[in-house]
Image (cartoon, helix red, strand yellow):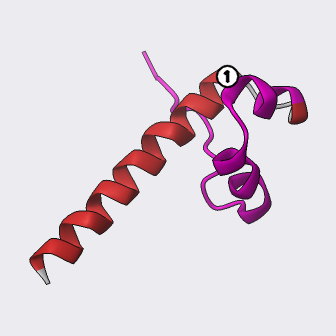
Amino acid sequence: MITCRPYTFIEDTEKMKDFLKLNKEDFLKSYSYLLEEEYDATVWEYIKRTRNAYKRQILD
């Protein structure tokens, strides 16, 4: 069985500005064409990237 990862919009600067400003419900209303799974996948990717950046900062 093949599984697909949900799309993330982590590289989309405009969406990420709103992502950081709006709560989940308001964001998904604004971008009605995005799925909740895509939003959630972006949350996890954002957490992963910020955590890695923090670790690099501590180690440097």
Residue 4 among those drawn in magenta: yes
**Is 40 or 5 nearer to us in this picture?**
40
Q: Is residue 49 left or right of residue 5?
A: left
Quarter of the figure with residue 52: bottom left
Position in image of residue 59 (x %, y %):
10, 76
Residue lying furthest left: 59
14 in relation to 29, above or below: below
Q: Is residue 11 above or below residue 18?
A: below
Q: Quick one: which residue is furthest to the top in this view? A: 1
Q: Residue at x 31, y 67 (%)?
A: 53
Residue type highlighted by circle 1: Glu
Q: Nearer the viewer, residue 2 or 42?
A: 42
**Residue at x 76%, y 49% (from the top left corner):** 18
| Spot occupied by residue 5 in the image (x, y as percentages of width and height) | 51, 33
Callout 1 secondary element: helix
Res. 60 in view:
yes
- Apparent side of residue 45 relative to residue 28 in the rendered image (left or right): left
Looking at the rendered image, the quarter that the C terminus falls into is: bottom left
Which quarter of the figure is the N terminus placed in? top left
- As for residue 33 lying within the magenta part, the answer is no
Magenta-tinted stretch: 1-29
Q: Residue at x 44, y 38 (%)?
A: 44
Residue tagged 1? 36
